[in-house]
Every structure is written in structure tokens, then in C-alpha cells.
Image (cartoon, rainbow, N blue to C red):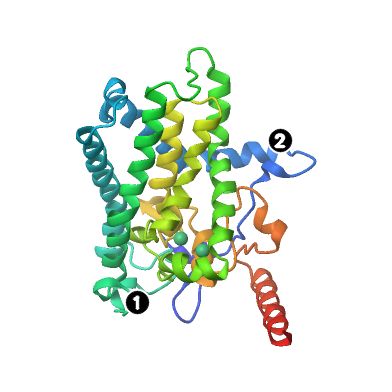
Amino acid sequence: MDDLQHGTRNKRGDWAPSRALQISPLFTFPPRPIKILKWLPGYLLPWNVLFMASAVVFWHFLMPDFATMQHLALGWVLRLLALNMSAIFVFYAVFEARLYIRRRQGTRFKYNARFPDDTKSDVFFFKRQSLDSLVWCFGFGVPIWTAYQVGVFWAFANGYVQWVSFSGNLWYLLALGFVLPIWHELHFFCVHRLIHTPFLYKWVHSVHHNSVNPSPFSSLAMHPVEHILYFSSVLLHLIIPSNPILALYQMHFAGFGAMVGHIGFDKIEVGQGGFDTHAYSHYLHHKYFEVNYGDGLMPLDKLFGTWHDGTPEAEAQMDARFKRRVARMNRT
Ligand SMILES: [Zn+2]
Ligand SMILES: [Zn+2]
């Protein structure tokens, strides 16, 4: 595919989409139903439907059965950990291998023309971003993700939370399933702002930002404190009436879904066509650090003046904001 029909490439070879990023129309007032209907397919496909499907498949075919999870025991916990490790590795590696190791589409639709592992750096274990990322992801990320799953399913299995069934509460649970990514966005935005405060940034979040040019393996390259905060979005299901499949969807959205913002390509080519990744907003966060704390599903960045939609105007606004801040710091 000719990526220059969809965007531009600068002198360094970095590609950028020509269309500005859009904030979802869900929270516009007055409501714009036609716009929402047009936006809906991109919201659901491909990722939200994929993670919903993965939750259903895991729940019915791969998870330990419910009676087993009533009692905490090393056997099923380790089995779940092994399942999660394998699933995350396979899911991330499919994209990493195709786009970053075999480089099947070269730099077409790639935001940053360089490939991270072509440059060795002392900030990474073994001097390579991908290997460093795997240490954080599998040493801390997946075990903490699994620990949340163990706790939540144990609570469901023992009847400690309000479990509502699909048969009696279909519309409630469908509506809940629809808004869970929005809850994820709100939670992620708050956590993300918190870990950008100077102390937490220095000791916690800087690990994630070492990947200035992220790849799929960077997705869960986080300090364990960030993993604990990031995955805590699932605790909502201990408070409101819910269903374990939706709790699992929430966790798959956070675990597998972390990959979405770190693909580094705007489109993944498949045959003569391709599909949009929705990765640009979070890519801009990795590039500029202090924009796009969320993904634009809610207008939070817009509200706080940190939204960057990829246009030169947004760039100029961001530069002006940085200059004002430097001037303020110099005055104090
Ligand atoms: Zn990131
Ligand atoms: Zn950040």
C-alpha cells in the first residue's frame, strides 16, 4: 500500500497520518447521534470485539473451573499464570515478529522510521529495548495481572461480590460491557496523571517512558508499582453488580489491550488492504511525554489542555505550553 496517500513523511523518514486525531463524539453536547453511529464501528472493531471474544473463549475453555477457584491453591494459580504468560507472549509476539523482526511492511505507516533494537542503549537491560521490555513484562507485569485475576475470581467464586447473570440482566450487562473501555480510559487517565508527578515519574513511570519509540513488547514494560495501579481498574467489578466474563474482559482490555498504543504503525497491512491500529494518540504521548494522557475516548485531555491531535496547530499549542512552563519555573 502507498502510505503517502494517507499521510506524509518528513526528512527523517517518520510517517504521520494526514487526518487529525478525533475525540470520540460520546460526550459532545448537544448529543450527535449520527456522528456516534458513524464512530461506533471504529470503537468496536477490531480491538474491543477481539478482547470480548478472548474473554469468552478463556472463560469457557481455558480458565480453571469455578469450584476450583473457590479455594486458593498453588496448582490452579500457577496454571493461570502459565496460561497468561503464554497468551500475552503469543499475542504481542505476533505483532512484534511481523512488524519489528521480519519487518514485513518496512516503514510503511510507521510513525518513527527507526527500529528500536537497531540502537543499543545503556538505559535498557542487555542494552536492547525489546529484551528489557520482556523482563518488566514477564518478571512483573503478567504475574501482577494474574494476581488481580486470582483475587477477583476467588471473590466471585465465593459469592463475595454481586454476580448478575446474562440470562436475567442481559441489557444491563451489555450496557456495562459497552462502557467498560470508557471506565478504563477514565481510570487510566487518573493513574497516568498521578504517575507523571515528579516523584512518581522519576521512580516509577520513567521505566515505561524509556521506550521513546515503542514496539508491541514495550506495552507492559512498566515498573511494578505502575502495574499495580494500571490493572486496578478491574476492582470496579468488586463494587458494582457484574459478571466474571465482564471482569475478564476488563482485564483482557488492560492486558492484551496495552499493546494497541504501542504498535508504532498506523495501519497493519493485510493482503491488498489493512486495518487501522488506533495507536497514534499514545505514540504521541511516548514522543512528547506531556500530551495525550488518555486516548481521546473521553475529552479529558482537551479539558486539561493536553490534547495533541497530530496537527501542526496542536504542536504549536504544545510548544507554547512548554515555553510558558519554563518561564514560570525560571521566575520561581
Ligand atoms: Zn505507553
Ligand atoms: Zn506517561
x%, y% of residue 44?
Answer: 51, 38
Residue position marked by numbered label 1 in the rendering: 123
Q: Position of residue 100 (x, y in %)?
A: 30, 64
The residue singled out by tag 2 in the image is: 33
Residue at point 35%, 48% (across, down): 144
Q: Dot 1 lies on which element?
A: loop
Please state which of residues 303 and 309 is positioned toward the viewer in this rendering.
303
**Rendered-image quadrant of the N terminus:** bottom left
Residue lying at 49% horizontally and 63% vertically, measured from the top left: 283
Q: For the C terminus, give its image quadrant.
A: bottom right
Badge 1 crowding class, 10 Å Cα cut-off, few under 14, some 14 to 19, many 20 or more, is: few
Specify the farthest residue to the right: 30
Q: Judge whether 65 appears above or below 135 on screen.
A: above
Residue at 34 percent of width and 36 percent of height: 150
Task: Establish if 29 lies above or below 20.
Answer: above
Q: CA distance from mark 2 to mark 1?
A: 48 Å
Q: In this image, 250 relative to 90: left or right?
A: right
Q: Position of residue 37 (x, y in %)?
A: 63, 36
Q: Is residue 66 left or right of residue 161?
A: left
